[in-house]
Image (cartoon, grey):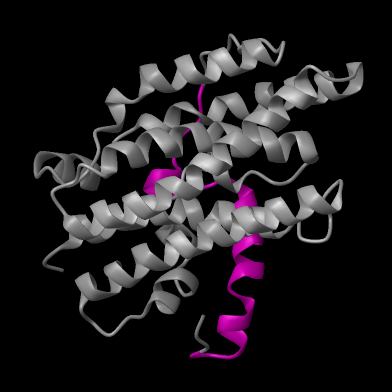
Amino acid sequence: MKNENLYNYLLGIADNSLILGQRMGELCGHGPSLETDIACTNISLDLFGQVRSYFQYAGKIVGDGRTEDDIAMLRKERDYKNVLLVEQPNTNFAFTIGRQFLFDVYHLIFLAELQKSNDLTLSAIANKCIKEVSYHVRFSSDWVKRLGDGTEESKAKMQEAIDALWTYTDELFHQTEADVAMVAKGIGVDVTKLKEDYYLRVGELLKEATLHVPESKWFQKGGKEGIHTEHLGYLLSDLQYMQRTYPNMEW
């Protein structure tokens, strides 16, 4: 493939939103209140909208007739390049919010840099997406503070979620071969330079929420290389069901 690195770079960005969008979509009808339920569903729709832009561009790059639906729905588990963080299940509402918050902070910082890309299509997508992600950060941050500085039970559950999810955060800043190639061309974002700002922002919010920053320095990785937790296979069986059952469906 002529533009294989760019194609894989797009997958690395888009798959995060695709998988997290599916996770948030699972909450439809199950939120703790009607307003929160609708907000979570809207975040899911925002993420899927972003995915379409990336995959439509990827379809043009690959040039073999594959559509956005093919790219989104018909790959095997090892072909998905999302980080492990976004595929973690909705254990409880605190876990859902903790996962969203830890990704949202990264996502906003990343898009701010992607707007500077030499690739005008990627820059335009980032410029559009950042408005939505700014809201996502506000939503998840407010809930982290509400739960962390709430009742004894809500504080304990929020802290438990942050502690459990922390091990997946460092992977956000690992570079793949495609990442390195795109950074060299001025197209991609050097995520290694985002790490300090990310942990500073997360730490400040957790402090405001009367939560502590986990001390663990042990992190898990593999998602960017297609090596996932057991959770992704079950998620994909739901995500891909309609497309595999009724081939050639369109979004």
Q: Residue 166: x percent and y percent?
A: 58, 24
The one nearer the camera, 33 or 62, is: 33
Q: Quadrant of the N terminus?
A: bottom left
The percent position of residue 246, horizontal first and vertical second, equals 59, 90
Query: Where 71 falls versus 78 (above or below)?
Result: below
Q: Is residue 227 visible?
A: no
The structure residue drawn at horizontal position 52% and vertical position 56%, both measured from the top left corner, is 47
| Residue 207 left/right relative to 46 | right
Report which quarter residue 101 is drawn in: top right
Q: Above or below — where is 54 with respect to 130?
A: below
Where are the magenta residues, as a range? 219-248
Q: Is residue 223 magenta?
A: yes
x and y percentages locating residue 145 in the rendered image: 71, 23
How many numbered discs, if any?
A: 0
Question: Residue placed at 72% from the left, 10% from the top?
Answer: 210
Would you say 58 lies left or right of 15 here?
left
Instruction: Give percent across and percent down for residue 170.
Output: 45, 26
Nearest to the observer: residue 172 or residue 106: 106
Residue 10 horizontal side relative to residue 144, left or right: left
Q: Would residue 42 be seen by someone viewing this image from the given angle?
A: yes
Q: Does the segment drawn in magenta span residue 196?
A: no
Q: Is residue 168 left or right of residue 109?
A: right
Q: Residue at x 58, y 62 (%)?
A: 45
Q: Who's the residue at 43% across and 23% down the image? A: 198
Main secondary structure of the magenta stretch: helix
